[in-house]
Each structure stands twice: as structure tokens, then as C-alpha cells.
Image: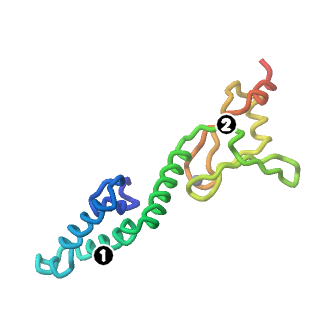
Amino acid sequence: MAASEGASLYDVLDVAPSATAEEIRAAYRAKALASHPDKAAMGGGRDAGSFRRVQEAWETLGVPQKRMEYDRRQRSSEAACAVTWHDELPLAAMDVDEGEDGQREFSYPCRCGDFFEISGVEIESITKTWTSGAVVVPCRTCSLHIRVFLPESCTAETGA
Ligand SMILES: [Zn+2]
């Protein structure tokens, strides 16, 4: 499961994400040499795709601008992961939409592309019956959930 996304470009070149440009260049040269199709063919045709992967990794990591963009994408996908897997956030962090009927809809983006969503009515009914100041909101599409903390004023209304 961990490998479902495939190795990172850094893994392909066998360098740390913090490697310097020189280290990446050296790693690329060594890998390209070792995985070159001519050489691989002589060696019994092992993994013909690895030379291509090394080239692709180099085309991104060897260009500072592309490497920066790649790093940023990697970081944001990790952040998305952290947020959507049983994350906890205040209700105020969710986006609020007012529907045609005047009802508020709270939503928060899920990494699957859909949204965690709960209506103001649901929150009201929950705060009336629960003493807890938090509510678990499922994604509309996938199996992820977030825990949303309700503001003090909301739970205060439930009365003690
Ligand atoms: Zn989802």
C-alpha cells in the first residue's frame, strides 16, 4: 500500500531529498551508466525500464526550477494526507456556504477531490443531544473522516 504511488524521483536516483545539485548529478551519472540499455542488454537484459526512469528523474531533479516544483507537489500531497486522515480542526476552518433555503453548509476539501460536508441543521441537532464539543464528519465520497470542534457558543446553547 505504501508503494502504491511508486518510488519518488529521489528514490530512483538513490539520493536523499536534501541532496545537493552536485550529489544528484553524480548519482544520475552512476545510475545512468549502470542502467544504460546497452549495458543492461549485455548483462542479460535486466529491467529495461530503469534507464528511462533514471532519465525521467534526472530531467526533473536536474533542473532547479523543476525540482522546486516537484518538492512543492510532494509536500502538498503529504499535507493533504495529514489533513484528511482523522484530522481535527475547528468549525471556523471549514468553508461556509449558504444554501437557497438559508441553511448553512460547512465543507472542507478531502484529498479524494470531494468534500467533508455537514449542514448547520445537523450541527444543531448534534449539539442538542451531545455534550461533546466535537463532531465527526465523513467525506461524501471516500471513507475518510475529520473531527470538527464546535465553537463554544454552539455547545453553550445546549445548556448544562
Ligand atoms: Zn474523500
**Depth order, front residue of 27/91:** 27
- Report the quarter where the C terminus lies: top right
Q: Verify CB contact (< 8 Å) between mark 1 and mark 2.
A: no
What kind of element bears circle 2? Answer: strand
- Report the quarter where the N terminus lies: bottom left
What is the CA distance from the residue labelled 1 to the residue labelled 2?
46 Å
What kind of element bears circle 1? Answer: helix
Task: Tell which circle, 1 or 2, labels the residue nearer the N-terminal end.
Answer: 1
Q: Which quadrant holds residue 89?
A: top right
Query: Within 10 angstroms of label 1, few (less than 14), some, or many (20 or more) residues?
Result: some
**Residue lying farthest to the left in this orientation:** 43
Which residue was labeled with disc 1? 52
Identified at 45% across, 62% down, the residue is 70
Query: For the residue with label 2, is its CB less than 8 Å from the closest atom of ligand 1?
Result: no
- Is residue 47 shown above or below 134? below
- Is residue 86 shown above or below 54? above
Three-letter amino acid code of the residue under disc 2: Pro
**Residue lying farthest to the top in this orientation:** 160
User: Which label was assigned to residue 90?
Assistant: 2
Query: For the residue with label 1, is its CB less than 8 Å from the closest atom of ligand 1?
Result: no
Q: Position of residue 121 (x, y in %)?
A: 80, 41
Q: Position of residue 71 (x, y in %)?
A: 45, 58
Colouring used for the render: rainbow
Q: Which quadrant holds residue 137?
A: top right
Identified at 21% across, 77% down, the residue is 36
